[in-house]
Image: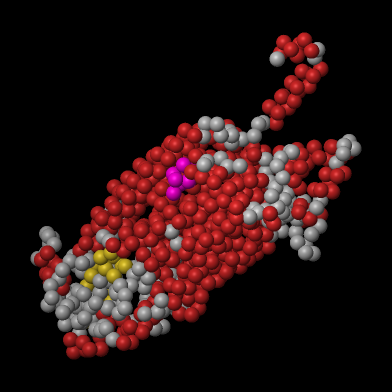
Amino acid sequence: SLAVVRQWTTIMASEEIEASKFLKDKEAGINVADDEKRLNSSDTTCGFSIFRGPALQRFATAHMFVIVYGIASCFLAMAFTYFTGTITTMEKRFNIPTKISGLITVGNDISTVFSSAFLSYYASRGHRPRWVALGLIIIAIFCLLMLTPHIFYGPGEEALRLTEEYGMSESFGASLNITEKNDSLCHEKNSNCLERAGDYTPIVLFFIAQFIGGIGCSLFYAPGLSYMDDNSASSKTPAMLSWSSFLRMLGPAMGFSMVSLCLRLYIDPFKKPLITTNDPRWMGAWWIGWILLTFILTISAVFVGMFPKEMPRAKARRLKADGEEDIPLAGRSFQDMLDSLKRLASNKVYVYNMLASILYLFGYMPYWIFTPKYIEIQYRQSASTSTMATGTWALGFSAAGILISGYVISKYKPSARAMAAWNFVVDYLTVAGMLCYVLVGCDESDRANSLSIVPTGDSCSASCVCEYVYYAPVCSPENITFISACHAGCTDKAINELGKTIYTGCRCMGNVSSIISLSNVTSLASQSQIAMDGACPVDCNKQFLIFLAVMCFLKFVGATGRSSNLLLALRCVPSKDKTFSLGFGSMVYSVLAFIPSPIVFGWMLDSYCLVWGKTCSSKGNCWIYDTKSLRYTMNLVCASLIFLGSFWNIGVWYHAKDMKVFDEDEKTVQAKQSDDIELKEKPNDVVTKKK
């Protein structure tokens, strides 16, 4: 906390020093009249329309923009994190396979490919805060579109079946195998089922929303980061970036916390569910958060859009430094953009850093998107617990890593080589952590999943077609979960003395008892045809806590490399190419990492599915996975990709030896100026000797 306060105090103190110098010059009568006229132009005026004046103008400072931009980026990250946290619930609600949800996720990256480079190039000479505000408004539209499937389709029949108001008689009967009612109770592939399950409109709406959201992100990040860098001194940029990143890191934490709270409510909050949040059939109120996010993002856009085109003090520094003239917006052509692209392609530090980042992002992407789902299926945690663990505890360590690294860089000002060296150390530590993920598995969960699909013969449940029965797990006395009472071959249901539903006459359970080795099979023989409603309990809490500790360590280590990596990306290119380099980088990352990675790993998750929630026209969503095979494959593939990327960071380290990251200290500059004055005042012979 002291480090954070000290860092922020340094920023504000330096701003006050600049202001006092300007006032002293003004009082001394130094020629500042012309400068004042130029500084007080419309480009440096805070606000818009009738919302202008001295009351707003005093907020036109770099550190105030960092606060407002950081809060806005927090809300933006909150929106996309909320989508990540509700993926599993949306898959259940709309019967979406993981590979399709991965395709929906990359919708924003597809739009980034077509928009980021061009928008960032032309926005670089425009009113960048207003471009950022437009991006926030587009993100608000994205949130509104994410809400529309619930408005059109409601909570769904499967969720309503599990409420007291709807009644459970139909769903219980549909899961049972009662021979005299076989025609009405067993699911068959009929025309009504085809009509109900063949609607892809929600998937299309989700994809369009993500596509629009990507355009908003393109307008938010590249112009915003370059505006922050251009309007602050180079020595203060690390502190600015770390504070902005810290505020942005609060977004995922707040987003996952909101997900956890919303998913604790049933998808229809006005009805009383008959199941608990630990039941795999539970569907939370995934849609509530989008209402709040639409509102707060619209408000944030208004505040960001009030900042001037250029900060007054930044303009004063620019006018004082006799640099190159900026190319006006009207004069920027496609050929100018090609020239910028050629300069970037010949920049080895930029190219190697991009290649290392592509492999790192490709390998780490599934952990950003599928971590709540991974925790749910590997360690049998509820959706709210999984999102809370991902969003609060883990991201708290990420925020700490960003702040500490920003403070260290600002205080000690390491060289470009030192920062590049730390980047490949981060890669190796990340690989080690992912190898630990492979070892942290829950054997009890692995065994339960494998037994859920034990072949039970053709006779025990052949009299009823169970292929399209709703997923309604039941637990046998041997602690084996069956997909439904139909799959267990049960013939009747009853309520026991504790008020819980039990199923009797479950012929398939005896077959499983003969397959598995149990010491007390004889004692269970009389109970082997009885099943309890709900999945069998599995205790994976110890393994979950170990996984959480490793994840927090990786989040902290990975976050310490963000500020250094961004500084290398900003400082390795000329100032005139800075905004375009960020936009072009976003486009390349989208094409080679953000788009293919979720699709590839979504397909990987689906390939290890054991039980599908089949509908009449598709496989639907997956309910049970081969957790052991999935754990090994996913983590080893990710670790291999990041390990390969570390070699490109070695190339960055080699070519960054002459790269300048920080401007000279004020004390150093003053000392040089005083030496020059002394040299001018000394006699010529002394000057000659000194030379």
Q: Position of residue 8 (x, y in %)?
A: 65, 42
Residue 80 on the magenta segment: no
The residue located at (52%, 50%) in the rendering is: 585
The residue located at (33%, 83%) in the rendering is: 194
Left or right side of 204 for 274? left
- Colour mode? secondary structure
**Which of the pair 669/337 is nearer the observer?**
337
Name the quadrant of the C terminus.
Answer: top right
The residue located at (26%, 55%) in the rendering is: 628
Q: Position of residue 350 (x, y in %)?
A: 51, 42
**Which of the pair 426/466 is nearer the observer?**
426
Question: Above or below — where is 568 with respect to 487?
Answer: above
Q: Position of residue 426 (x, y in %)?
A: 43, 40
Question: Above or below — where is 115 with respect to 200?
Answer: above
Q: Position of residue 646 (x, y in %)?
A: 40, 40
Q: Is residue 374 visible?
A: yes
The residue located at (79%, 19%) in the rendering is: 680
Q: Bounds of the magenta span?
A: 352-358
Left or right side of 400 for 643? left
Residue 353 on the magenta segment: yes
Image quadrant assignment for residue 274: bottom left
